[in-house]
Amino acid sequence: MEDKMLLVTDSRYFSREFNTAIIDGPLRIYFADRQESDALKIYFDIQEILADRGMRLESISMERPNMFLMLYPTKQTFKDAFDIEDELASGKFGKHLVLGVNGPYNESTRKQIGQKIRGAFVES
């Protein structure tokens, strides 16, 4: 029997409300179109974090685990994926990291995402 490769879009982390994505190297940001402003802020913040370390997303080997950053548009979609009610949660999808953001992007989640990005792409 042939093994089927699982896709994050088939996982518990993916919401039907996600209809837009930013994909750059090992980073995938999924969100609803009404969250585009937050998604772009996060994307540019990530680029700044990496640039401070002399890195760029396209220079990160695709052999490394990917990061799936999910911006959940409602508290319920976040809870459905992670079964908690925090601002931010993480999980694993195979060898890849899944990071979920509950609701709007703010200074608190910005700092937490920055720490996760440094841990995933810079410090490993």
Image (cartoon, rainbow, N blue to C red):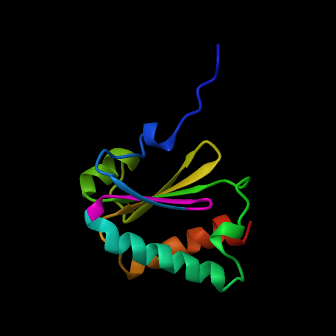
In this view, 122 is above or below 88: below
Residue shown at 70% from the left, 72% from the top: 122
Q: Nearer the viewer, residue 42 or 113?
A: 42
Q: Nearer the viewer, residue 16 or 97?
A: 16
Q: Nearer the viewer, residue 73 or 22?
A: 22
Quadrant containing the N terminus in the rendered view = top right
Q: Quadrant of residue 30?
A: bottom left
Q: Quadrant of residue 107?
A: bottom left
Residue shown at 56% from the left, 48% from the top: 92
Q: Residue furthest top?
A: 1
Q: Nearer the viewer, residue 78 or 62?
A: 62
Which portion, as a residue range, is magenta?
24-33
Give the image location of residue 29, x and y in percent. 46, 61
Residue shown at 64% from the left, 78% from the top: 50
Whether the magenta-drawn stretch holds residue 32 is answered as: yes
In this image, 109 relative to 34: left or right? right
In this image, 64 relative to 30: left or right? right
In this image, 96 relative to 22: left or right? right
Q: Is residue 32 visible?
A: yes
Quadrant containing the C terminus in the rendered view = bottom right
Q: Is residue 109 visible?
A: no
Whether the magenta-drawn stretch holds residue 41 is answered as: no
In this view, 113 is above or below 31: below
Is the stretch drawn in magenta largely helix, strand or loop? strand
